Amino acid sequence: NTQSGGASWYRYNDGECAHRTLPRGTVVTVSANGRSATCVVTDRGPYTGGRIIDLDDGTFAQLAPLSAGVIDVTITW
């Protein structure tokens, strides 16, 4: 399965992320800027329009600088 939209970051546990509907424990591959990283859904969110996933700051940093704030991503699971 694939979904595209915005990703933001928050200070959370390394390798963990938040998604509104995917079951907790789902391993997600997040791709952006020609890079990819994986995380495990353990939290709920984001609840801001257009955003599909919240990444812990370490996972986000593998894809783009934290200063980017929000990036366009494709997630697969």
Image (cartoon, rainbow, N blue to C red):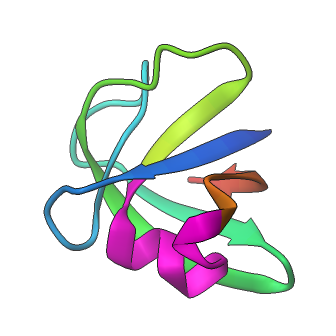
Farthest front residue in view: 67
In this picture, which residue range is highlighted in magenta? 55-67
- Magenta includes 61? yes
- Magenta includes 14? no
Q: Is residue 10 visible?
A: yes
Farthest left residue in view: 13
Instruction: Give how far across and how far down residue 20 sits, in percent.
Output: 43, 20
Q: For residue 13, what is the image quadrant?
A: bottom left
63 shown above or below 52: below
* Residue drawn at the location 42% of the way across and 30% of the way down: 22
Would residue 33 be found to the left or right of residue 77 on screen?
right
Would residue 57 be found to the left or right of residue 77 on screen?
left
Q: Which is the main secondary structure of the residues drawn in magenta?
A: helix
* Residue drawn at the location 62% of the way across and 46% of the way down: 7
Instruction: Give how far across and how far down residue 55 sits, in percent.
Output: 42, 55
* Residue drawn at the location 44% of the way across and 53% of the way down: 9
Instruction: Give how far across and how far down residue 50 sits, in percent.
Output: 74, 22
50 shown above or below 28: above
Pick the quarter of the image with the N terminus.
top right
